[in-house]
């Protein structure tokens, strides 16, 4: 039974059709329907839009394998944030829970317990096996989205983690998501080392100098909460007064390489991933800043109403 859903859409970014062979909604629909014939846990539903399809699967790994397979076959697509499937059982809103097993060196066990309990997990078993601590948790499937990268950071990459579906249980309430905002590209051009160097104190970049970016593309993680629109494509103004060696002093930190699954765990509600045979880019679902503000305003008025 599927426990998660993701929105699959055609690639509607300014760079569509550059890498892939199959870019239309007909190609995408035919491929997803073909997949359901042999992938029994997968379900595909049409949405109100002809360009978008709701795909149900058994978790991030299951959906991630499908995205990677399609990418290698030459498809271009946009995928949204993974959402858990909520059911009503005995009149109560219920969500899927999973058993999470973590083996970790003893000195990191406190960090792991703290991290999982923040995501509404409950510790059921704690055993010491030589120098390792064996921990068994029960955690909502929502809490597992994005836990892998945090687990790696907090345990210096030493944690061994596995999880499996347990059952549906009553809804646990809100779970904290990503705390930092993102830096969004202001214009469409190639990034420059000069601009990235000036912006490095604002965040950690996902792009290298010389990479083409477009309006609304996410190019870095902000060091603070809240999004920031930046110009990373500005060239250096050359004058006859500049010192000959000053360009050599630009020190750019290499970009953060994120896997497809890390991207799926990283994005928020209003963001999506552009997947093409050669590139994986993070972007805002609504690329234009004014349109994004209008949409946010509309959502707020609906909530108040």
Image (tube, rainbow, N blue to C red):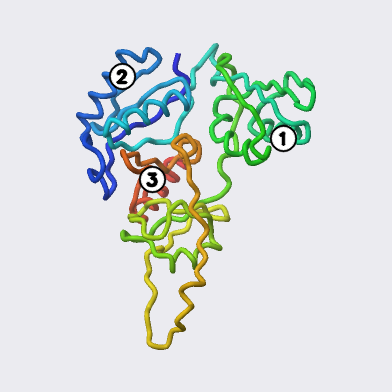
Dot in front, 3 or 1:
3
Position of 161 compared to 130: left or right? Answer: left
Q: Is residue 223 above or below residue 170?
A: below
Q: Is residue 163 above or below residue 71?
A: above
* Viewer-proximal residue among 176 and 42: 42
Earlier residue among tags 3 and 2: 2
The residue tagged 2 is 35
Q: Picture coordinates of residue 123 (x, y %)? A: 72, 23
The residue tagged 3 is 281
* Viewer-proximal residue among 103 and 177: 103
* Viewer-proximal residue among 100 and 117: 100
Residue placed at 51% from the left, 52% from the top? 221
Q: Picture coordinates of residue 19 (x, y %)? A: 26, 43
Position of 21 compared to 168: left or right? Answer: left
Q: What is the quadrant of residue 272 in the picture?
A: top left
Residue 271 visible? The answer is yes
Q: Residues within 10 Å of mark 1 (few under 14, many from 20)?
A: few
Q: Disc 2 to disc 1, how far (Cα)?
A: 39 Å
The residue tagged 1 is 114
Residue placed at 60% from the left, 30% from the top? 173
- Quarter occupied by the C terminus: top left
Residue placed at 29% from the left, 47% from the top? 13
Total marks placed:
3
- Dot 3 falls on a residue whose secondary structure is strand
Q: Disc 3 to disc 1, how far (Cα)?
A: 32 Å
Q: Is residue 64 above or below residue 223?
A: above
Position of 196 compared to 17: left or right? Answer: right
């Amino acid at each position: 039974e599927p426990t998660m859903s993701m929105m699959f859409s055609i690639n509607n970014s300014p760079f569509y059709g550059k890498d892939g062979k199959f870019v239309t909604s007909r190609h995408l629909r035919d491929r997803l329907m073909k997949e359901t014939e042999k992938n029994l846990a997968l379900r595909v539903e049409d949405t109100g839009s002809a360009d978008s399809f709701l795909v149900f699967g058994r978790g991030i790994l299951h959906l991630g394998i499908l995205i990677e397979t399609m990418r290698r076959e030459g498809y271009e697509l946009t995928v949204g944030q993974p959402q858990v499937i909520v059911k009503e059982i005995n009149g109560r809103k219920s969500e899927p829970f999973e058993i999470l097993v973590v083996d970790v060196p003893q000195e990191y066990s406190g960090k792991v317990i703290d991290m999982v309990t923040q995501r509404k997990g409950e510790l059921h078993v704690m055993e010491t096996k030589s120098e390792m601590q064996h921990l068994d948790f029960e955690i909502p499937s929502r809490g597992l989205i994005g836990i892998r990268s945090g687990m790696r950071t907090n345990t210096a990459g030493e944690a061994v983690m596995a999880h499996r579906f347990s059952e549906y249980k009553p809804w646990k309430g809100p779970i904290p998501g990503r705390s930092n905002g993102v830096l969004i590209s202001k214009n469409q051009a190639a990034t420059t080392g000069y601009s990235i160097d000036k912006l490095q104190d604002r965040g950690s970049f996902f792009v290298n100098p010389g990479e083409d970016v477009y309006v609304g593309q996410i190019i870095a993680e902000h060091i603070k909460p809240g999004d920031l629109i930046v110009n990373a494509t500005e060239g250096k103004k050359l004058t006859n007064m500049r010192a000959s060696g000053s360009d050599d002093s630009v020190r750019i930190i290499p970009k953060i390489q994120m896997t497809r699954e890390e991207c799926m765990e990283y994005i928020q509600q209003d963001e999506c991933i552009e997947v093409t045979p050669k590139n994986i880019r993070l972007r805002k679902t609504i690329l234009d800043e004014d349109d994004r503000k209008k949409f946010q305003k509309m959502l707020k008025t609906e909530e108040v109403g």
